[in-house]
Image (cartoon, rainbow, N blue to C red):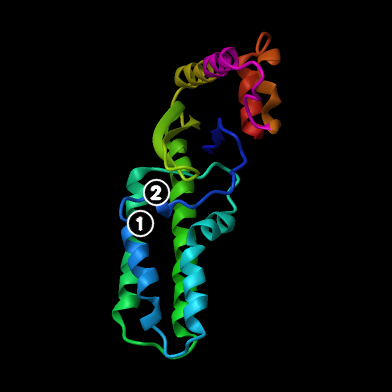
């Protein structure tokens, strides 16, 4: 069974959200906020809906509940943004709604957006399972919208030679990381068996057993 090892910190800091990194976000949500006054017959819906739109980004990150950094590929960000904008545009095409309907629909779209982002980030990590050895893919950090990348380790090796090469590549990667910053914790707490103090006498069998257990 293919397993996944992410050689990154396992804590995702709260941030402003992923969708705001999309090029059309400011234009789209500016329109949504400025036209919220015309979407409900009940005046009480207006401040509620406005708050939902204003807090959209921060609330997104609070609801993601990811144990991995919130980093998404540009392709998947485009897919999520397109889906969200389509749902929002359809909602805004309607006339005034009866009391309570508009903010409820906004909440539904918000929750769907959270699921889309979760799936997009996790799917990219799972794709690593179909590779053998160290793999890196380009992403955007949801923390600050800067270009970033994710490094992971895939176990889908078809031969013992490929597996041996993959593990050696993993150990080389860890050694290089350690040389760059000796104060940095290299892997998750559950994988201390792969940290530099243990590498000197680490056999291929030991590495395989360590990785399979986690």
Residue 81 in sight in this render = yes
Q: Which mark is residue 21?
A: 2
| Of the pair 54 and 206, the residue shown nearer to us | 54
Left or right of 165: which side holds 35? Answer: left
Where is residue 120? Give x, y as percent.
43, 50
The image quadrant that residue 185 belongs to is: top right
Q: Does the CB distance between marks 1 and 2 fall below 8 Å?
A: yes
- Who is closer to the viewer here, 94 or 175? 94
93 up-or-down from 21: above or below: below
Quadrant of the image occupied by residue 79: bottom left
Give coordinates of residue 195: x percent, y percent. 66, 19
State the residue at coordinates (31%, 75%): 90
Q: State which quarter of the image contains the C terminus.
A: top right
Above/below status of 141 relative to 36:
above
- Per the image, label 1 sits on a secondary structure element best described as helix
Counting the numbered discs, the total is 2
- Magenta stretch holds residue 182: yes
Residue 87 visible (yes or no): no
| Mark pair 1, 2: CA separation | 7 Å
Crowding at mark 1 (Cα within 10 Å: few <14, some 14-19, many 20+):
some
Q: Residue furthest top?
A: 200
In reply to whether residue 144 is colored magenta, the answer given is: no
Q: Quadrant of the N terminus?
A: top right
Q: Which residue is mark 1?
A: 25
Q: Position of residue 191 (x, y in %)?
A: 67, 28
Seen at 66% across and 33% down, the residue is 213
Secondary structure of the residue carrying tag 2 is helix
Quick one: which residue is furthest to the left in this view? 93
Q: Nearer the viewer, residue 106 or 198?
A: 106
Q: Give percent across and percent down for residue 170.
A: 53, 20
Range shown magenta: 171-188
- Measuring 48% from the left and 64% from the top, which residue is drawn there? 54
């Amino acid at each position: 069974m293919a397993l996944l090892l992410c050689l990154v910190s396992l804590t995702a800091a709260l941030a402003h959200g992923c969708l705001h990194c999309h090029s059309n976000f400011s234009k789209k949500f500016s329109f949504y906020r400025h036209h919220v006054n015309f979407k409900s017959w009940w005046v009480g819906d207006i401040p509620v809906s406005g708050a939902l739109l204003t807090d959209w980004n921060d609330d997104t990150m609070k609801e993601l509940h990811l144990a991995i950094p919130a980093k998404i590929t540009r392709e998947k960000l485009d897919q999520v943004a397109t889906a969200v904008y389509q749902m929002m545009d359809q909602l805004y095409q309607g006339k005034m709604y009866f009391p309570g309907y508009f903010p409820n629909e906004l909440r539904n779209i918000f929750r769907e957006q959270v699921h889309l982002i979760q799936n997009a980030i996790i799917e990219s990590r799972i794709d690593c399972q179909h590779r053998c050895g160290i793999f890196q893919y380009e992403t955007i950090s949801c923390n600050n919208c800067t270009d970033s990348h994710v490094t992971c380790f895939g176990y889908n090796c078809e031969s013992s030679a490929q597996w041996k090469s993959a593990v050696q590549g993993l150990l080389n990667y860890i050694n290089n990381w350690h040389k760059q910053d000796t104060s940095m914790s290299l892997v998750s707490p559950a994988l201390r068996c792969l940290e530099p103090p243990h590498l000197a006498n680490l056999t291929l069998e030991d590495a395989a057993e360590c990785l399979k257990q986690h």
